[in-house]
Amino acid sequence: MQLASFLNDLEFSDEHVVINSLLESEFGKEIRIAFKEGQMMKEHKTKYPITVMTVIGSIEFMVGEKIVTLDRGDVISLDANILHELKATEKSVVRLSLHKGDTVARVKGILKL
């Protein structure tokens, strides 16, 4: 058994979003992403499907020309190989659920794009 909290020990940075791996199991990974207002993860994609949930705050989730606002408690799933972008409209915490074959290093690498 593993236990983690998306709300305890939160860190925010003025320079970039903060990405932390919270849990890893045989079937997936749970990642916490902390955004200050206006911070974003530029357009990117993954070869695996993902699920994104706003734990607190509000995120604009962009796929092509479509923008979906994810408020507290909202969740969205995305198929593999779909370009998408995230932007915080306020201080926010996001839960990213990854496939077991995906890596936290890939997620952190998005910040360098």
Image (cartoon, grey):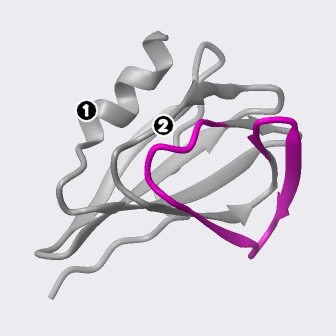
Mark 2 element type? loop
Q: CA distance from mark 1 to mark 2?
A: 14 Å
Residue under the point 87% across and 36% down: 65
Quadrant of res 41: top right
Tell me: residue 32, above or below residue 6. above
Mark 1 element type? helix
Locate residue 58, reporting x and y percent.
Answer: 84, 53
Extreme bottom residue here?
A: 1
For residue 81: magenta? yes
Residue located beneath label 2 in the image: 45
For residue 95: magenta? no
**Which of these two is toward me, 107 or 80?**
80
Residue under the point 82% across and 26% down: 38
Q: Look at label 1 and name its amino acid.
A: Ala
Instruction: Read off the magenta span.
Output: 61-84
Residue under the point 17% across and 55% down: 101
**Which of these two is toward me, 36 or 106?**
106
Extreme left residue here?
A: 26
Locate residue 63, reporting x and y percent.
Answer: 73, 42
Residue under the point 62% across and 26% down: 43
Locate residue 53, reporting x and y percent.
Answer: 63, 66
Locate residue 3, reporting x and y percent.
Answer: 28, 79
Residue located beneath label 1 in the image: 105
